[in-house]
Image: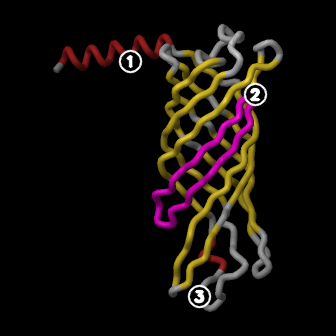
Amino acid sequence: MRKILFALLASFVITATQAQFVKKDVGASIFVGSASFTKGGETVKIQPSFYGVSWYPRYVLGNKISIGIPVTLGFSGSVNSREGGSFSFGFDAPIAVDYNFGYGAAGGEEESDAGFGGFVGAGFGYTKTAQATPDNYNTTIWNESDFSASKSYGPMAHAGVRFPIKQGENSITIRLSYKKGLETEKFNFFGGTLLYGF
């Protein structure tokens, strides 16, 4: 048992020393969620959304596997004809393990000759945003407190494409993501991100 633990520890240390930290991808994102609430036999659909500034720090390992946190911080809000609306901060922070290919797969400039690159991965995420209040809910059943800020967590999958610019010195990344909510309300969030690597 000790030999197995020692081998795992040694493997982790070797992998960590070969990893490269990439922290220069910044940009903007938009997230749109959806959920259905049922109360008193009536169901309403909620679609919260938010947009914000994104940063994608990641560790790229020697085998083109990376571990990262594509975090977004921004603003969310909703407007409706009954209550006027709400406003709050939006936040999305998943941790993801990705397989990288092509340009930028190793996190450096050594692949600047590649036409493009990208990644596919999965992980677990947390999202917080204001809920959008529907216009057509029945006021005898629903009130504004039923549509307070949403907090969602669950498995996340995402993929992206990287394009080199300025002869490979910089990059543009387009990322799409989807998170399945595990909370009671089961919010599902779609996301789109545009990142600039420098």
Tag 2: Cα neighbours inside 10 Å, few (<14), some, or many (≥20)? some
Q: CA distance from mark 1 to mark 3?
A: 55 Å
Q: Secondary structure at mark 2?
A: strand
View extreme (bottom): residue = 140
Q: Quadrant of the N terminus?
A: top left
* Residue at the disc numbered 2: 172
In-image side of 3 versus 180 (left or right) = left
Q: Secondary structure at mark 1?
A: helix
Residue ID at (62%, 72%): 45
Tag 3: Cα neighbours inside 10 Å, few (<14), some, or many (≥20)? few
Report which quarter residue 138 is drawn in: bottom right
For the residue pair 184 and 116, the one nearer the viewer reads as 116
Of the residues shown, which amino acid type is indicated by label 2?
Ile
How far across and down, in percent of the image, does residue 12 sit?
Answer: 38, 18
In-image side of 66 versus 13 (left or right) = right
- In the depicted structure, whether residue 14 falls above or below residue 118: above
The part of the chain drawn in magenta is: 173-198
Report which quarter residue 173 is drawn in: top right
- Residue 198: in sight, yes or no? no
Of the residues shown, which amino acid type is indicated by label 1?
Phe
Residue ID at (55%, 23%): 59
Q: Nearer the viewer, mark 3 or mark 2?
A: 2
In-image side of 101 versus 74 (left or right) = left
How far across and down, in percent of the image, does residue 135 sit?
Answer: 73, 78
* Residue at the disc numbered 3: 141
Residue ID at (83%, 16%): 166
Q: Quadrant of the C terminus?
A: top right
Residue ID at (78%, 70%): 79
* Residue at the disc numbered 1: 12
Of the residues shown, which amino acid type is indicated by label 3?
Ile
View extreme (top): residue = 110
